Image: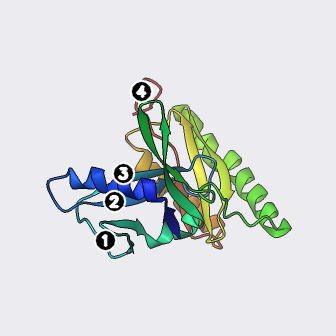
Amino acid sequence: MIKISKRAETYLNILINKKNQKTNLRISIQHPGTEYAECKISYDYNTIHPKDIEIKYSNFSIYLNREIVPYFKNSKIDLFKNNLEKQLMLIAPNAKESSIDHTNKNRKLFLKIQSFIESNINTQLSVHGGKITLLNITKSGYIIIKFSGGCNGCSMVDFTLKDGIEKQILKNFPILKGVKDITNHTRGNHSFF
């Protein structure tokens, strides 16, 4: 699933051996299946979760949540050198691979949800200078949204998402399973609360 070049594996062994305690690696992804997808390799100090899978290498293991495995199909970790610097690179060609169902039926659903958001949800959020944008619908039945304006960084955004937006959308579109927010929330003067 995730191939590691020999030079990257050697370099990772050196880095891990410098740690004082039992250390492995964790691979994660933020906003998988969207143009905003970001992959990350980090140290993992034995924080294994029930949904984790383990990939064993010679002197260490890599852990990742089994739900993100499809995004790492055909992935590779390699080490690149330029001048005096070394850089590990995680190449995940499927990280941004959308799980959107592009059928005509799904396109119609997308447009209906988008219209509902504009006429029902964004009119409410605009009172606080905010809005949401519908980005896609996953094959597993979740809609992906992004907050902007006064909603970005607002301290009430989780409440607004779960108790407001998601409830309204699921009530009107029971075919869906939920709403996922991919906003990189940054608190600032623009934030309503």
Query: Alpha-carbon neighbours of circle 1 within 10 Å: few (<14), some, or many (≥20)?
Result: few
The label nearer to you, 4 versus 3, is 3
Q: What x and y, as percent, mark residue 158?
A: 42, 50
**Is the residue 161 above or below the residue 153 in the image?**
below
Query: Alpha-carbon neighbours of circle 3 within 10 Å: few (<14), some, or many (≥20)?
Result: some
The residue beneath circle 4 is 188
Q: Which of the marked residues, 3 or 1, is nearer the chain's N terminus?
A: 3
55 to the left or right of 101: left
The type of residue carrying mark 1 is His
**Which residue appears at 44% of the width and 32% of the height?**
192
The residue beneath circle 1 is 49
The residue beneath circle 3 is 11
Where disc 2 sits, the SS reads strand
The type of residue carrying mark 3 is Tyr
Q: Which of the marked residues, 4 or 3, is nearer the chain's N terminus?
A: 3
How far is mark 1 from mark 4, CA to CA?
Answer: 34 Å
**Farthest-out residue, right:** 104
The tag on residue 25 is: 2
Where disc 4 sits, the SS reads loop
The type of residue carrying mark 4 is Gly
The label nearer to you, 3 versus 1, is 3
**Which residue appears at 36% of the width and 60% of the height?**
26
**Is the residue 62 above or below the residue 12 in the image?**
below
The label nearer to you, 2 versus 1, is 2
State yes or no: discs 3 and 1 in contact (Cβ < 8 Å). Answer: no
* Residue 28 shows in this picture: no
Nearer to me, 183 or 121? 183
143 to the left or right of 184: right
How far is mark 3 from mark 1, CA to CA?
Answer: 26 Å
Query: Alpha-carbon neighbours of circle 2 within 10 Å: few (<14), some, or many (≥20)?
Result: many
